Every structure is written in C-alpha cells, then in structure tokens.
Image: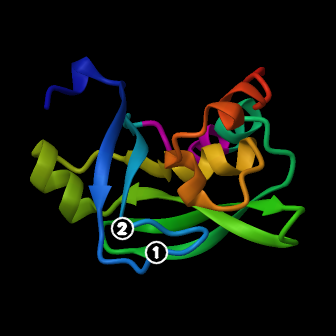
Amino acid sequence: MNKNDLPKKYFAVGRVFRNEAMDWKHLFEFEQVEGIVVDENVNFRHLLGYLKQFFRKMGFEKVRIRPSHFPYTEPSAEVEVYNPVKKEWIELGGAGIFRPEVSKTLLGTEIPVLAWGFGLARTISEYWDLRDIRDVYKNDLDQLRNMKLFMR
C-alpha cells in the first residue's frame, strides 16, 4: 500500500454465517454492516468517535462501549444499546484496531486500521422495537405498514 494514497475508508454490507443457536436475539446467518478506516493518524479515540456518531444517527439514546476480545484486533470493544422493553443491554457489534501482524500481512506495512461490524437485523430490531429478531424476516405486510419511518 502506498502511504500517499491514505487515508482510505471502506463501508460494506455482507452476509455472515456462524454456528449459533437461534433465539430472540441470535440468528445463524445475518447481514453485517462493516466499516474500515486505514490511516496513519488514527487511534482508538477515533474509533470510539465513529461508533458513537454511527449509533447516534441510528437513533439509539443509550449506548455503551465495553472492552472485549476479538482475535484480529487489539484493543477491541463491543457496542451495546439499552433495550427498555427487555430491560437489558443488547450487543449490536464489535470493533477494534487490527493487530500489527494483521495489517502488515494485508497491507505490507504496519498502519493503523480501524474496523467495526454490526448485525443489521439486530440493529433494525432495536430501532423498530421488534421483540424477536426473527420478526425481521416475517412476511407480514401489516407489520411493515405500521412501522415508524426511519428519520435522523
């Protein structure tokens, strides 16, 4: 990677498959929203800023970011929002800075890479107050007609 081409920012939506038991907040496959920023001048505070801004724009009032562990990032964090109906915090995604051995392998040099990923269905469920994540995939036209519009 040529450092003169930096910074680079990427955003994608892709399908993820995992070995998971299905329940009201877990699916074995889901769409994930991903963001990546490659820049010599970014750090963990920048990542926290991206996360806070993203969730504010999604309409979430109570957001917390906790330390976590993911194998390819260090430091790592989980993003949670408060579900007032279930009275509990719901994990919506993970984030971190690529470990140097990851960025060097991918880019040929050790450059900070901010990365995050969020389950789209879980985010949608929280925003539209769906009580069960499986309701995202129901073919219920009345449910769709009665949902509030997405507004920032």
- Residue at image x 80%, y 28%? 148
Label 1: which residue?
22
Q: Taking 52 as reference, is 133 above or below it?
A: below
Q: Taking 110 as reference, is 91 above or below it?
A: below
The region drawn magenta spans: 41-51
Q: Helix, strand or loop at disc 2?
A: loop
Q: Helix, strand or loop at disc 1?
A: loop
Give the amino acid at mark 2.
Phe
Q: Foreground residue, 50 or 2?
A: 50
Q: Foreground residue, 66 or 124?
A: 124
Labels 1 and 2: the sequence-earlier one: 1
Q: Foreground residue, 21 or 118?
A: 21
Q: Is residue 97 magenta?
A: no
Question: CB under 8 Å between callouts 1 and 2?
Answer: yes
Label 2: which residue?
28
Whole-angstrom CA distance, mark 1 to mark 2, is 6 Å
Rendered location of residue 64, percent (x, y): 76, 61
Give me the disc on residue 14. Answer: none
Q: Quadrant of the N terminus?
A: top left
Rendered location of residue 126, percent (x, y): 71, 51
On the image, which quarter does residue 78 sit in? bottom right
